[in-house]
Structures are given as structure tokens and as C-alpha cells.
Amino acid sequence: MLMIGVAALELAEHEKRWLSEPGVAGVLLFSRNYQSRDQLSALCDAIREAGGDDMLIAVDQEGGPVQRFRDGFTRLPPLSAIGERYAHDPHEAVRLAEEHAWVMASELRASGVDFSFAPVVDLARGNAAIGLRAFHAEPAVTAELAQAYVRGMHLAGMAAVIKHFPGHGSVATDTHKAAAIDPRPLERILSDDLLPFAECIEARVEAVMMAHVTYPAVDPNPAGYSRVWIERILRGELGFTGVVVSDDISMAAAGAAGSVGGRVQAHLDAGCDLVLACFPDVVDEAIAAVQGRETGRASLASLRGAIAAGWDGLTDNPQRDRFVARITALHTEPGMGNGES
């Protein structure tokens, strides 16, 4: 029901108590929680010791500007670099998307992390928060590359989480900082932004993250608070049966529902299965908001990582060496995004 953030490299006693609450299903890690691979593995063990073996552990490890674990991990190029390659060699770009995903996912699974919130399938159409994180401006290209990325994650034993439904790339506002409104009619959103989501759902993605964007031509509520978007369109028209995830409740654009507790309740009432409370200072109120609600934890089982090789197995893997060489070469190729922000 809740995926929470913790403050540091080790769990505090009050955070261990949070993890024992029935409404807490997992922990989302950030750069503040990472020092080394050994420390990360120890933290994952401590999280599961406090919360149980079913406790989910996740991170945003997209590559480029959004990669929380860096030292000791492959420095992943942004997805935009793969999209740029598509213009020159579509077949190679599809292969690179799958290899990028496999490297990202296999390294996280070797460390005890279940999944990354990836891939971004928003269109690269100028949004301040998306930027290099998106594959491409064209829906069909984005869909093809995103499906390849999902395949790579699945090959590494990791669930895929596509974001930000129904599309964050075509509105300029950064929802971390302000409310975002996309005035386009549903027909335009369906023909453009929703295509990559629909095709990835056909590829059996396990989860979809909602956007903190309001589409007033469809519903006056932001998408993550909207039963129209979640129940009628995502589940009804697109046939999605997996896990629906909110974006972080601390973002400015989530403020439409008022207090922390109100935001949590609004997401759950709209049909979200997992609500992100990423900052420790909101966790107590978020936990209070879910007291007495059905946890729905069984529906989250698809997000748990499969058994995977450890780091010793990865570093003695010639296939991984080839994948890493090809994807990291994108950092230095002329015209390619360098992943810095």
C-alpha cells in the first residue's frame, strides 16, 4: 500500500518500526541511502529483517540524470542517447535498449533491490522534468524502444514499471515544482502519448506509475487521483491488470488533495495500489492515513525480483562486458546525450 523513504545509510529504530506496519509494503531508496555495494546489500538485508521477506525494495536507476547508485555501478547513459541512435540505426538502437535494461536490472538484482521505476515512456517533447530521460519524441519509436527495454528487464529477473501515465512529456511544467495542466483532448492524448503505454501493456509490464498532471478535457483531477484515468481508461480500455503506482506525494503537483493523509487517501480511492511517500518527514502521517484499510499486498507480489546472480557472477560474465562496452560508448559518441544534468 505504501512505499516509503528512509533517511540514511542504515535504518534508525523508528524506521524499523515503520517497516513493521501492515500498510507499508516497501522502501524506495535514493542517493542518500547509498555509499557502496556492500553497504547497499546490508541495508537491503536490514529492511527485510525489519519488514519481512516480502518487503519490496526499489530505486530510480534510469540512467543519465536519474541514477541513484553510481560508484560501483555501470554509469548508464540517458535513454535519449538510445533514441538518437535510432535515427541512424533502428536495429542497433533496439538492441541497445534491451542491453541497457539488462545491465541496469542485473546490477540491482545482484545487490538485493527488487526493481527500478523504469522505463520512462513519456514523449521527449520539451517537459522540464523529463528531458534526457525520454527515448524519443515520436510515439511509435518510443513504443518500440520501450518494449525492448521491458524485455531486457524481464530477462534480468526484474519487473518493469512504465511511467508517467497517461503521458508527462507534452506539458512543459515540472510537477516537482508546480501544478501541471495539459489541455489537449483525449483523442490527441490517445493517438500520441498513450501509444507507448498501450504497447508496453501488451508486453506484460507489471506496473504503471501515474502522472501528477491534470488533463481537464478528460477529468478535473490529476491523473493519479482520477478514477477516469485509472479505472476506466487504464484498466478498462487498455486492459491493464497489474499494479498502479502513484508518483511521490510530496511533489508540488500532488497538492490538489490537500494534506499528506488526504493525498494518500485520494490515490487509494482512485485505484492506486502503491503510494509513494519518499521523504521521511511525511511517513508518519502517511502510515496513519492507511490504518484500517485493506493492504492489498498480495497484488504486489509481481514486483518482487527473481533469483539472480550475485556480483561475482556478473563480473565474470563476458556477455555483460560486451553489453557494458556498447551502452557506455553512447556517452562519448558525437551528438549523443551525455547523461549529465
Image (cartoon, grey):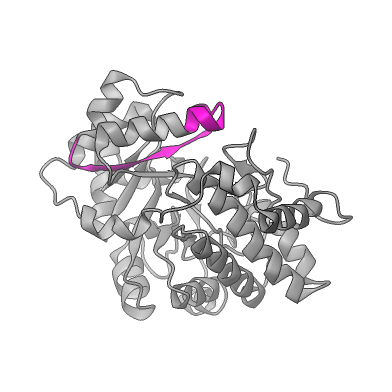
Question: In the image, is 250 to the left or to the right of 91?
Answer: left
View extreme (right): residue = 334
Q: Is residue 109 above or below residue 42?
A: below
Can residue 135 be seen by looking at this rendering?
no
Classify the position of the C terminus by image quarter.
top right
Q: Is residue 339 above or below residue 192?
A: above
Can residue 230 be seen by looking at this rendering?
yes
View extreme (left): residue = 292
Residue 110, how many percent across, how many down? 51, 45
Q: What is the count of numbered marks? A: 0
Q: Is residue 119 magenta?
A: no
Question: In the image, is 278 to the left or to the right of 148?
Answer: left
Q: Is residue 102 above or below residue 203?
A: above
Question: In the image, is 285 to the left or to the right of 208?
Answer: left
Q: Is residue 90 above or below residue 21?
A: below
320 or 94: which is nearer to us? Answer: 320
Q: Residue at x 39, y 78 (%)?
A: 238
Q: Residue at x 30, y 43 (%)?
A: 55
Question: In the image, is 238 to the left or to the right of 329?
Answer: left
Quadrant in which residue 124 is drawn: bottom right
Q: Residue at x 68, y 48 (%)?
A: 76
Residue 36, how many percent across, how many down? 56, 28
Residue 272, how many percent across, how many down? 30, 57
Residue 290, how many percent across, how many down? 18, 42
Q: What stretch of residues is rendered in magenta?
A: 21-40
Q: Is residue 23 magenta?
A: yes
40 or 28: which is nearer to us? Answer: 40
177 or 240: which is nearer to us? Answer: 240
